[in-house]
Image (cartoon, coloured by chain):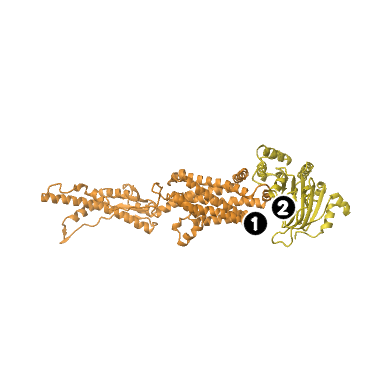
């Protein structure tokens, strides 16, 4: 153990003085996690995975606008109401077309009056030129950001229709209640025949009779944080950084091989297992520091960027186990690279390309479910996919350690396989 | 060992190598072919040879870097193939290349190699101090190796091989590319070490160096020792004026590493 610690200290001292290595291991994942999360946060907005920004202009100033505004606020919109004294519908059109808002809603002047009139027309005989007459529908103008995806546009329209229908339904129920009361009075029926007053009929009709009971596989006892770009990206990019430790590990091995250091080490009373254990110990510590750094950025710094904070939940110890297994896999890959490659340049290029490819295939950049079927099948061979799946199972799905045992097993097997391959290669 | 076993009494030898053969993959000729060498304990032995003659291969086998294909070898009476760790405790290797971490300081390098040799605590401290003094680097302990001169690196390279006070020291061309002062310091220190009982096996291209330092030399050519003995005695027998003339007479003027 004394010699393993000596080897680990040496690795850490070398890394401490390797500025490029420190940049790759710590600054790169820190920057990537911030940039990519901010970008994806915007993508989620565009794909409707978060509240859509809506601007609302009530030119009417009557009852209708108030009711609709209230309905929209309760829906899946982040509503900004504009002051009619300063803005008009052209301003809304410009703001929405320019992408400042995704949806714009304008209640034209006199809308409340026209709405009341149409409502009244529906419930009384109103003949014009010998035919039943009902005044025209009241238009509510809506503008869409041209960049809004068609699917999202349909969803927004559906939400707007629900809001409009709700307002209309409440008004109709009010009228209906009044009509019933009037008829009862006319017929001389005593009040109280109705099981409830007509005044609260609107409220009662709004209560849903049916509901969607959404079930998930999350652990029943745990309150899991919602899935968002932060919960996806923090473990993903930390894992990406972890696998980049393969490059400095390969670099130190190549430096030792190409200078006389390896000859000196081999001529000393110390086994290769001890020397490699020192490297693995040191870089496993580095990997934990990487996770800590990216996790702290996600938890403490993201809220300042307007992003949700990263939350670990209750499975911290299991999470650390995943970090450990991922770190071992990365160290094993570094040892293999350092053994197979003949120069640092070769190891650096090969290491970077393979880690980026494994990250892309493994779902670090784009979630696996969003990939074509072929890529989804390929993703199961990526060690980054094993690590990321384990993180998501713990962080998003709330699974226990038993659920991630296959992924952890794969990472450990990968570590052992790379060591065995390196040993075989070194012997031949 | 595949071919025979060392004779009784070989433990009296610091190095006893018999019929060593070593062939590298994808090479036409073996690096060692019937290599025999007997070095007494306490000797300062010079191994002379052209590039590619087999000096480094022999040193590598003696210092347990790899085993021979056939033949037998004992280092201080211990078989390096059967008991490599025992040989590693008894011997020290100073490789031809600078075997140091450029981004560690002088003292960090010594501490690391000392710990791997099994030293710790006060013993490690005292050996590191001794090595710094030996290499004339006491005032440069906290300097990064990358900022040291070629001579300083060579001296440190030598000192790092002495941390565990080996009984036998294998030096593979330890004075290549350094100035006269550093070379003189290394020579003086090696002579002192040898006087204190350390057996030294020294490979070099420099004939004068071998003549000055070594009590005996062996000339290696095409993987075998062609002659060995006291340098002055060999010169007298050959009738040549210098060791270099004698060397060329024995090995010819053809390039060996083509």
Query: Is A245 situated left or right of A116 in this image?
Result: right
For mark 2, give the secondary structure.
Answer: helix
Q: Residue at x 72, y 52 (%)?
A: B60
Question: Image quadrant of residue B117?
Answer: top right
Q: Chain of mark 1?
A: A
The residue that mark 2 highlights is B60
Q: Residue at x 84, y 50 (%)?
A: B231
Q: Examine the rendering and report whether any part of residue B79 can be seen.
A: yes
Host chain of mark 2: B
CA separation in Å, label 1 and label 2: 16 Å
Split into 4 quadrants, where in the image is the N terminus of chain B?
bottom right
Residue B56 position (above or below residue A3): below
**Colour given to chain B in the rendered image:** yellow
Q: Position of residue B156 (x, y in %)?
A: 71, 44
Res B177 visible: no
Q: Colour of chain A?
A: orange
Within 10 angstroms of label 1, few (less than 14), some, or many (20 or more) residues? Answer: few
- Residue located beneath label 1 in the image: A427
Q: Position of residue A208 (x, y in %)?
A: 27, 51
């Amino acid at each position: 153990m004394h010699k393993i610690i000596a080897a680990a200290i040496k690795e850490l001292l070398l890394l401490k003085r390797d500025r490029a290595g420190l940049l790759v291991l710590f600054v790169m994942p820190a920057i990537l996690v911030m940039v990519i999360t901010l970008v994806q946060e915007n993508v989620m907005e565009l794909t409707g995975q978060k509240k859509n920004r809506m601007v609302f202009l009530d030119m009417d100033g009557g009852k209708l606008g108030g009711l609709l505004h209230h309905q929209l606020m309760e829906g899946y919109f982040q509503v900004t109401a504009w002051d009619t004294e300063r803005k008009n519908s052209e301003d809304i059109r410009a703001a929405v077309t320019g992408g400042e808002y995704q949806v714009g809603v304008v209640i034209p002047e006199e809308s409340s009056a026209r709405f009341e009139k149409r409502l009244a027309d529906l419930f009384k005989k109103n003949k014009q030129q010998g035919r039943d007459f009902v005044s025209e529908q009241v238009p509510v103008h809506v503008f869409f950001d041209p960049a809004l995806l068609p699917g999202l546009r349909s969803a927004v329209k559906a939400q707007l229709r629900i809001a409009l229908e709700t307002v209309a339904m409440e008004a109709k129920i009010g009228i209906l209640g009044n009509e019933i009361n009037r008829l009862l009075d006319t017929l001389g029926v005593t009040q109280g025949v109705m099981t409830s007053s007509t005044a609260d009929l609107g409220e009662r009709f709004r209560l849903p009779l049916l509901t969607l009971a959404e079930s998930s596989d999350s652990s029943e006892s745990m309150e899991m944080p919602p899935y968002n770009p932060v919960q996806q990206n923090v473990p993903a990019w930390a894992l990406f950084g972890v696998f980049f430790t393969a490059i400095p590990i390969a670099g130190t091995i190549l430096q030792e091989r190409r200078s006389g250091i390896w000859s000196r080490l081999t001529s000393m009373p110390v086994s290769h297992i001890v020397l490699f254990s020192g490297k693995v110990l040191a870089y496993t510590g580095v990997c934990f520091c990487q996770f800590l750094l990216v996790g702290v950025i996600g938890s403490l710094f993201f809220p300042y960027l307007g992003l949700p904070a990263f939350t670990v939940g209750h499975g911290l110890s299991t999470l650390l186990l995943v970090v450990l297994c991922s770190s071992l896999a990365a160290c094993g890959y570094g040892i293999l690279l350092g053994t197979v490659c003949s120069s640092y340049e070769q190891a650096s290029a090969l290491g970077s390309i393979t880690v980026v490819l494994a990250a892309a295939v493994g779902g670090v950049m784009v979630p696996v479910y969003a990939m074509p079927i072929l890529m989804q099948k390929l993703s199961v061979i990526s060690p980054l996919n094993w690590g990321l799946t384990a993180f998501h199972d713990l962080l998003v799905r709330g699974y226990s350690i038993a659920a991630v045992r296959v992924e952890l097993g794969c990472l450990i097997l990968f570590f052992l396989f790379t060591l065995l391959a390196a040993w075989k290669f070194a012997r031949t | 060992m595949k071919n025979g076993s060392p004779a009784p009494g070989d433990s009296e030898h610091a190095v006893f190598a018999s019929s060593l053969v070593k062939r590298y993959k994808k090479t036409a000729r073996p690096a060692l072919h019937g290599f025999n060498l007997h070095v007494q304990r306490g000797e300062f032995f010079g191994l002379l040879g052209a590039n590619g003659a087999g000096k480094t291969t022999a040193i590598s086998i003696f210092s347990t870097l790899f085993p021979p294909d056939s033949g037998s070898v004992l280092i201080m009476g211990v078989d390096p193939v059967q008991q490599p760790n025992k040989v590693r405790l008894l011997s020290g290797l100073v490789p031809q290349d600078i075997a140091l971490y450029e981004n560690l300081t002088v003292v960090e390098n010594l501490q690391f190699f000392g710990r791997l040799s099994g030293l710790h605590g006060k013993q490690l401290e005292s050996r590191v101090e001794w090595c710094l003094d030996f290499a004339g680097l006491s005032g440069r302990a906290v300097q990064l190796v990358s900022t040291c001169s070629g001579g300083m690196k060579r001296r440190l390279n030598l000192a790092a091989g002495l941390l565990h006070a080996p009984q036998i020291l294998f030096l593979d061309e330890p004075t290549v590319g350094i100035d006269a002062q550093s070379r003189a310091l290394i020579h003086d220190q090696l002579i002192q070490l040898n006087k204190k009982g350390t057996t030294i096996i020294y490979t070099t291209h420099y004939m004068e160096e071998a003549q000055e330092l070594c009590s005996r030399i062996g000339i290696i050519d095409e993987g075998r020792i062609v002659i060995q003995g006291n340098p002055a005695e060999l010169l007298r027998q050959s009738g040549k004026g210098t060791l270099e003339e004698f060397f060329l007479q024995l090995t010819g003027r053809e390039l060996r590493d083509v």
